[in-house]
Image: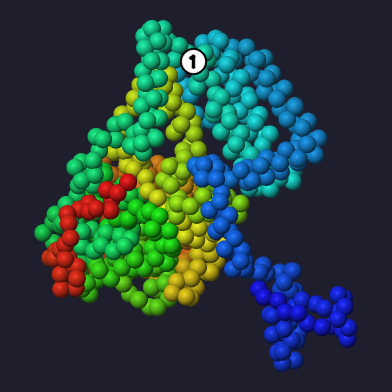
Amino acid sequence: MSWRKTRTGGKCANRGIAFIPESDLATRNRPLAHAAGSRERGNSPWLGRDSAPSSAFHALQQLERQLAPSGLVPDAAVAPATAVGAFADWWVHLLASPAKQWELAQYGLEQWACAWGGGTDPSSEIQPIPQDKRFADPAWQAPPYCWIAQSFLIYEQWWQRATTAVPGVTRHHEAMASFAARQWLDMVAPSNFVSTNPLVQQRTLREGGANLLRGAAHVLEDAWRNAADLPPVGAEAFEVGRNVAITPGQVVLRNRLIELIQYTPTTRTVHAEPVLIVPAWIMKYYVLDLSPSNSMIKYLVDQGFTVFAISWKNPDSEDRELGMDDYAELGVRSALRAIRSIVPGSQVHAAGYCLGGTLLSIVAAGLGRHNDDTLRSMTLMAAQTDFTDPGELALFIDEGQVAFLEGLMARRGYLDRRQMAGTFQMLRSNDLIWSHRVTNQLLGERRTLTDLMAWNADGTRLPSRMHSEYLRGLFLNNALARGEWTVDGGPVNLRDIHVPIFNVGTVQDHVAPWRSVYKLHALTDTEQTFVLTAGGHNVGIVNPPGSALSSYRLRQWRHGERLLGPDEWLAQTPSTAGSWWSAWGDWLKQHSTRSVRPPHVGAPEAGLAPLEAAPGSYVRVR
């Protein structure tokens, strides 16, 4: 905003000179018919809408970021200012509430009385939450270890109550305080120490301390691998193109951001409509093409579909200016154009996973706005479109946190994969950090890596501009659900999606909670089939037929029918044994038109000649 000097009186005195924004001068020059509107509070530079930062600020901010110490918490998961603010909010309000303090004192006394006054009555013991397996071994049932475990569980439950329902604390700060308490408790749990873990003590006595020597060697080896940016021990057993990501195919398109892979058919005829897989770029695409026994891509090919998959480039500092629009244009829309050149006249079944599903829904809404009939159907897998309740990831996303990340990304031009991996590990610190360290360092055992675990260690980077737009636009402003996300200069609305939707949520998803995924029902008018499958964000999606533990719930909704709330849906939808892949395959077939001969690989006449065999080059970049 620029300012001009004007006189308000006859003398050039300080009180007679006012600095008026040019916007106000323009308002003064408008016809009188607009005078009433010009007096709205929202037009004031001090009230209502914020003014945009000046060019001087942007220039100085770049200088500030360049001068910032490069080693200042480079891989921190939480902005220091955000953490301090959350702690202060909780602590001040706790001090200001004697009622909460009295409640905590009473609760602590009751818990201790219950634990120690019940004698041998098992019903008087404090029970851990169902997913906490730290004290499940019978060795923890004998004194003094049972007393140690009980004491820890009492502290755990007390701290959970102490950090929640404190009057006056904001919801976000309360969640952060509770999360911090859980992180601290997971760190000091008695299972983490030789002196208080009976299993470690038994192993140490039996092996004469050899387990601890092996553990020390493991620590050194892991530290060396981490410093050298090497994959964890055991990952070498899974090599891309050798025993994972081996479904036959050809790269038929390569641009600055993607390689498009067309897979070789295995059936004499295929369904007329091909399938496009849009994975998230916070992960490598081959999570959907792991070993042949659990490859979703191979499953679809064997079901008679012509399958295409996007393999995203792992960006570096030169890609810092790639934004969400680039991912839509160079990614999904470029892939769709290529597919329609290879399979002329055919519509496409598009399927997006995680952030790839969110991007796909944006592109689908844009296509719908322009009455483009490219899509035949849309499948979303653990993908959010409404971010009002994004689960525990919201702990790491607020204005302060985003500004902190933008500062970290400014030097390198991207978010480092190790920082992102650390954030996800903190969400499940007991399982992914501390129990791993007990096994690896105290028991001296190396866990055998699976193909999914090896893939999880093969992380990616995120361009700074894209990541900032994603966090601010989707998480902070919820622009997509509010109809404020823009494509090609205009806003898109999810109600512009008119193709049938197959929407998948997973029960234990801590990245895209299924109730959040379910909200798409209220944002579209089109036919939607919602599936809730067992497992988490990855295991629930990589869920091939044949597993005895697989199950899912499925219900279809059409426009005009009463929309069930998520809890109603859960209560009224029965569970079915088996993999949701089978139900999805049947759904895709129902929404396909006919069987045809497989198309040629690529379209050389359209500049889409095969470039190299799958899995291509981009997926190999670390």
Residue 388 in sight from this viewpoint:
no
- Is residue 561 at least partly visible in the picture? yes
* Residue depicted at 60% across the width and 36% down the height: 180
Identify whether 585 is placed above or below 525. above
- Considering depth in this image, is 568 or 225 the residue closer to the camera? 225
Give left or right: position of 486 versus 226. right
Left or right of 229 in this view: 239? left
Q: Residues within 10 Å of mark 1 (few under 14, many from 20)?
A: some
Residue lying at 24% horizontally and 34% vertically, measured from the top left: 237
Image quarter for residue 252? Answer: bottom left
Q: Choose between 559 and 266: the one closer to the eye.
A: 266
Q: Which residue carries the number 1 mark?
A: 194
The three-letter code of the residue at mark 1 reads Val
Secondary structure type for disc 1? loop
| Foreground of the two, 236 or 491 | 236
Which residue appears at 81% of the width and 35% of the height? 98
Residue 614 screen position, x and y as percent: 20, 53
In this picture, is 397 found above or below 270?
A: above
Answer with left or right where residue 515 lies relative to residue 499: right
Quarter of the image with the N terminus is bottom right
Give the x, y percent position of residue 441.
41, 22
Q: Is residue 285 above or below residue 218?
A: below
The residue positioned farthest toward the left in the image shown:
268
What residue is drawn where x is 19% and y is 42%? 242
| Left or right of 549 in this view: 199 | right
Colouring style: rainbow
Give the tally of numbered discs: 1
Percent position of residue 24, x then y: 72, 81
